[in-house]
Image: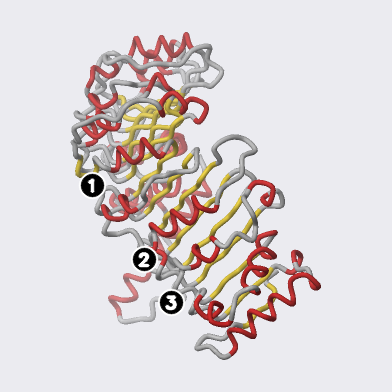
Amino acid sequence: MEWSLLSGCIRKKWNVLRKGVSNAAGRNPDAEISPPRVTIKSLPDEILLEIFNFCRVASMKAPHLWSGRWANTWHQLVHVCQRWRYVVFSSPLGLYLRLYCTDRTSVRNMLNVWPPFPIDIISHHLEDNIMAALEHRDRVCNLGLYPSSYSNFERLVTVMRDPLPALLQLRLVGRGAFDRVPVLPVTFLGGSAPNLLSLTLDNVAFPTLPQLLLSCKDLSELCLHNIPYLGYISPEALAIGLSSLTRLTSLMIEFKKEETGTIRDLPKSLPLTHAHLPALTTFHFRGLNEYLEDLVARIDTPQIKILFIKFFLQPVFDIRQFISHSQSLGPFDRAKVEFDHSTVLIQLAQSEGAAPSIMELEIGQHAPGQRLRLSSLVQICTQSSSLLSSVTELNIIDSPSFSAFIDRMNNPQWLVLFDSFTAARTLRLSGEIQWSIIYLLGGLTRESATKVLPKLQNLYLRKMDWRDQLEEPFLEKFIAARQHSDHPVTWGFDG
């Protein structure tokens, strides 16, 4: 056992008790107090139990997640002495006692030795020992399955046609090297998982998933990664499945990029079916804007605080649909616009608050090598102006290869984009964009220069991208134009 972990937990528990005694006696809790000369045998059972619980918390990433490290710890705790064994076994729920099964575990022997505790399974090969663990259907709590071959996947589907009533978490990952797309049938889990808290499917087709979701009343996390074409679920069907998930806090929908062309041509489903998701705070989406537009029209998400959207193609999606559905998104005070050779990333963040809000949008190009259009970025920012009007710091960054993939660098649409950042006091520029924006700002009349970014006070440039003879005259002209305004601008180098 990791005795350093146990001794550390004992020291932490002693400090808690020491401060409690000192406060009760009116002494300074930070004053040095020598521990009493006692052995661990003299500690009462309830103190031992708290120490063991400290060990559990220290060895697990979070409650109700995989228990492998803790399983190895409590197995050794119960072998110290009969009393410790009694203390551990007296609190199987509080100490989160699980039997942890992997491909290397002698499952049948372990099941015969230990009491009938819940079972956690992580497996890549789904060999006989794992199948033996799955036979105890009413005890399986957490499943992490990564079939190494399509035949293993078929074997898994066969054994999981019946319900697992105690299942709390399921993660199923299909390998990209399979010779065909893994597809889950409607009979998977018997079509019901009433206690499921978290479901992750990666590169697995499950077209009848909405039917299963209707039984998952307590589901709090749903992650659908790399959805293949055979696993396509229409926005209407997905909304029906989501309608029963009133406790869902995190939703992720990510399509496989190479298969979105076929999905794009599928017709929209009418009439609209609405799903109210009152607990949803985090939403991730990767795919085509047509799908997102249809889905957003069907769901209400009043508590969204963290939003990540990645469009494969330059969108025509109206982001105001999402903003109008959320009461908790923003306000934001920091914004970063980052250009790469094929994408533009918009990040908005809230620096204060107990649970800061985050919004991230990524826009892709129409085809490899095609230029990104500033109009797409301007469209998104204009639609999000209600969220951007509180931004005080704006960062614009690009990659070395960026200039070859965007339409004209001195495009006046930069000025339209800046119209959305009316409260920005600090502007940071780097890369080719630095020259382009300075060139544009320096060409403005005095009246126009005072209107662009009207609250701007600080302009920071990256020194390694600075070109004295080209940039300085335009920069000085802009600084001079702002000198007699209500908000003069100072500039400097920022790295």
Q: Where is mark 3, residue-wise?
A: 30
Check the image and report above or below for 230 versus 218.
above
Please state the horizontal and vertical placement of residue 214, each as a whole percent of the image: 20, 29
Check the image and report above or below for 122 versus 156.
below
- Which numbered marker is on residue 331? 2
Helix, strand or loop for disc 1: strand
Quarter occupied by residue 35: bottom left
The crowding category of the residue bearing disc 1, from other C-alpha atoms within 10 Å (few below 14, some 14 to 19, many at least 20), is many
Please state the horizontal and vertical placement of residue 93, each as a whole percent of the image: 27, 39
Front-most of 216 and 427? 427
The mark nearer the N terminus, 3 or 1, is 3
Front-most of 289 and 352? 289
The mark nearer the N terminus, 2 or 1, is 1
Specify the amino acid type for callout 3: Asp
The mark nearer the N terminus, 3 or 2, is 3
Front-most of 338 and 88? 338
Q: Where is mark 1, residue-wise?
A: 300
Helix, strand or loop for disc 2: loop
For the point 30% across and 38% down, the residue is: 295
Helix, strand or loop for disc 3: loop
Quarter occupied by residue 294: top left
Specify the amino acid type for callout 2: Pro
Give how far apart the Cα atoms at labels 2 and 1 are.
19 Å
Q: Is residue 154 visible?
A: yes
Give how far apart the Cα atoms at labels 3 and 2 are.
41 Å
Specify the amino acid type for callout 1: Asp
Give how far apart the Cα atoms at labels 3 and 1 are.
51 Å
- Which numbered marker is on residue 332? none
Q: How is the rendered protein coloured?
A: secondary structure
For the point 36% across and 66% down, the residue is: 331
Q: Is residue 86 visible?
A: no
